[in-house]
Image: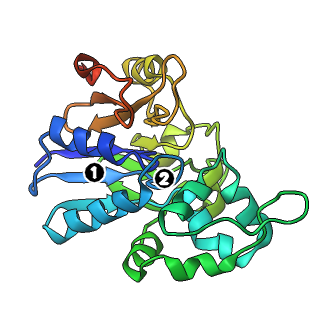
Amino acid sequence: MTTFAVSDIHGCRKTFNRLLTEIDFTTKDQLIIVGDVIDRGPDTRGMITDLLQLKGDGYNLTVLRGNHEDFFLTAWKEKGIFDCWVYPNNGGDKTLYEYGWTGSHRDPYGYICYDREYMKLIPEEHKRFIAETRHIYEKDNFVFVHAGLDFYTKDPIRDTEHYNMLWTRGTKYDEKKLNGRYLITGHTPTTRKDIIQNKDQGFKHLVIDNGCCFESIGYGNLCCLVLDTMEFVFVRNCETNRIAENDRKERWMA
């Protein structure tokens, strides 16, 4: 059994499926997804469909909640959250369009009007999949959470507010409070170089979000951590034709 961790897939279904091929993922393995399955990329609906299929086929998936899943679950309750979610840079609009939302209701100033009816368009099994995501997961020498923990509390595992687990940045890691375990997070896009250097320099807080949806230098990959070997597997975003076949995978050994 091999355990893998990946984060911030953001609807990049083709890239995710290529990653599964590259790591030879089987039903004997475990894949921990550290939040942000949805939004921004071209196929959030397909991503959720594939993950449900994998679970149904007996694959071992542990899916954590990211701030984008939190958007999905809370946007119907409050206009301000909805407006923030469907703002193009956050990508909620792309997700809703995939479910048949038209986004055609706009006020006289051109802003999308609050539309809580979108929830009726989303299949119940997709809503349930997102609602059942967990905030934190512990396994052996690792702690997984989407954004970070509050190390100013006495016990970061139990005392960190859910909001901080989903949204915080710049976590100041305290090795004693996690008994020396690794903290694995996503949420904050980090260059491939920095991801590798942080591990090589012995940092116990590793961010594995390489900004799969971004095209800037140093970003644009789906980053997977192989827990057993502390090896990173980077798979280049292949949602468009701009990626050359021989650039699709790079491995960095411990």
* Along the line of sight, the residue nearer the viewer: 61 or 155: 61
- CA gap between label 2 and label 1 equals 23 Å
Amino acid type, mark 2: Asp
Q: Residues within 10 Å of mark 1 (few under 14, many from 20)?
A: few
Count every numbered label the image shows and give the total. 2
Q: Residues within 10 Å of mark 2 (few under 14, many from 20)?
A: many
- Residue 138 found in image quarter: bottom left
Residue holding disc 1 = 140
Q: Is residue 42 visible?
A: yes
- Do tag 2 and tag 1 residues touch (Cβ < 8 Å)? no
Q: Which residue does the image show at 60% across and 57% down from the upper left?
A: 92
105 left or right of 160? right
On screen, 236 above or below 38? above
Q: Which residue does the image show at 39% across and 59% down from the upper left?
A: 137
Residue 123 picture location, percent across and down: 42, 79
95 left or right of 137? right
Residue 36's disc is 2
On screen, 54 above or below 37? below
Colour mapping used in the image: rainbow
Q: Earlier in the sequence, mark 2 or mark 1?
A: 2
Q: Is residue 254 visible?
A: no
Indicate the secondary structure of the residue bearing disc 1: loop
Residue 235's disc is none
Residue 148 picture location, percent across and down: 56, 47
Residue 33 picture location, percent across and down: 36, 52
Residue 227 picture location, percent across and down: 25, 39
On screen, 172 above or below 220? below
Badge nearest the viewer, 2 or 1: 2
- Residue 62 found in image quarter: bottom left
186 left or right of 55? right
Amino acid type, mark 1: Asp
